[in-house]
Image (spheres, helix red, strand yellow):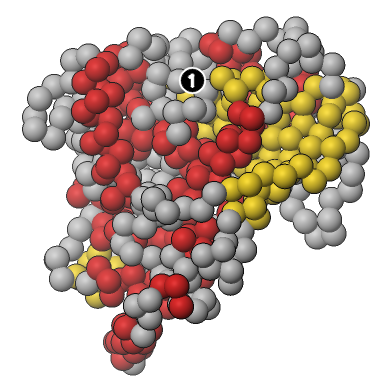
Amino acid sequence: MILISIFAAFFNARMLYSQQPTDSVTAELRNWTTQEDHQNMMMQLGIRKLRPGPSGRDNAPNPANYDESLANPFPNLPEVLTLKNGKKVTDAEMWWKLRRPEIVEDFEREVLGRIPENVPQVTWKVIQTIEAKVGDYPVIGKQLVGHVDNSSFPSINVDIEMILVIPAKAKEPVPVMMMFGFGILPGTQPPSGSKKRFSGPPPTGSDPPATEQLLAAGWGYAYLNPYNVQADNGAGLTKGIIGLVNKGHPRKPDDWGALRAWAWGASRGLDYLESDRSIDANRIGIEGVSRFGKAALVTMAMDPRFAVVLVGSSGEGGAKLHRRNFGEAVENLTGSGEYHWMAGNFLKYGAAEADFGSMNAGDIPVDAHQLIALCAPRPTFISYGIPEKGDAKWLDQQGSFMAAVAAGPVFRLLGAKDLGTSDDYNSEKMPPVNVGLLNGQLAWRQHDGGHTDGPNWKYFIPWANKLLKHNSTNR
């Protein structure tokens, strides 16, 4: 019966795909389920069976591995400073002109997907401007909407929400940290049932919210709502910005996934920030936690205009090495629950049976250390918490530290400082909790909190101020 069900799902996906109109202008919006879209991509790739991802529950039939002796089945990472023709990269010019484009191409084709050339323009409009206070700090807040031109396919509407808050008394343009999440204008109430990034005052004895810490240091902040750009599920892939560009069609194997779409949205937000004379366009950062930590790292790697990044608890698909067998695995990203984050081609690396045989994490041409390296030499801060407080072992903090170590040679090649460790990523161990490696443009700190980057903001801000040469008295 199971085989019959699988065959039926595969057959239905093939029929759905075969019924697509060839004229994309007259296409109708596909209201597919996640399972239908997932099966369609498997059909396009010739995949008959995927390996199941490990479970985060210890008592599950297929529990995740947490044994370090079994964690490195593919101990040798792809060379970050060796061209595909075997030549070593020896100077910055070779990196920028030859090696970096190779790495970007591999990520776009196999991991994250490509942004199509025909993505419509975004027009930003200020909906509301207010004067208010955030904590003790007078601010000017703007509510913005970026409307994506949908004249080519009016069935899909994409309007990107962004909140911008800057110090009211700033004497010159201020740096801004853009954060993935839901924000509201200071002094206003959130919509009923909405998700808030911060709710109420911090508990007694804790740090002030990141927003107040930024304002105290002379920064502004922006919240960009990623769900306006692209839904966080497979059923949404024929909608949002991905669906709009595809005019309601399902993706092709190298089309962008949600991580790349969210990063594209952040870049469009940056377009607006660059046009605002109250903002220092050369000092705009990006931040996110968990799946939005992944998106923040992708944003920084792919858009060189961002000056600094805080990558919070990003795990698999973010700073964690794909080749590590510890906690969440590649097979989780290729399953129906998370595949939408990635390019369709990424499903190949979870294939157990396919026209091309089978593939696994060791076959991926790139890995997380190269995604981090694409951020070099700009300041890149990798943040994690501890499992005891909720930043689960599932995220593989050690695997992310190894990736940061392995990215170090690129930072040094470009004249920046790395973590200050050796380059032996297989032997380097994380520093103790609350001991940061913050002396270079590549930074690491594991705080003693949970699934948040909150405890690291008080370290991130002075670190960023120093490297970006921002005078925090400008407020």
283 or 354: which is nearer to us?
Answer: 283
Whether residue 74 is visible here, answered yes or no, is yes
Q: Residue at x 48, y 71 (%)?
A: 248
Q: Quadrant of residue 94?
A: top left
Quadrant of image for the N terminus: bottom left
Q: Is residue 130 above or below residue 171?
A: below
324 or 316: which is nearer to us?
Answer: 316
Tally of numbered discs: 1
Q: Quadrant of residue 164?
A: top right
Q: Is residue 64 above or below residue 166?
A: below
Q: Does dot 1 land on a helix, a strand or a loop?
A: loop
Whether residue 423 is visible here, answered yes or no, is no
Q: Crowding near pointer 1: few (<14 within 10 Å), some, many (20+)?
A: many
Q: Residue at x 58, y 69 (%)?
A: 154
121 relative to 110 in the view: left or right = right
Q: Residue at x 23, y 36 (%)?
A: 102
Residue 321 % position (x, y): 34, 40
User: Which residue bears the numbered disc 1?
Assistant: 379
169 relative to 99 in the view: left or right = right
Residue 403 % position (x, y): 35, 31
274 relative to 192 in the view: left or right = left
386 or 475: which is nearer to us?
Answer: 475
Which residue is the extreme one toward the left?
Answer: 86
411 or 119: which is nearer to us?
Answer: 119
Residue 436 % position (x, y): 52, 18
Quadrant of image for the C terminus: top right
Instruction: Check disc 1 and give the amino acid type.
Output: Pro
Q: Residue at x 30, y 66 (%)?
A: 51
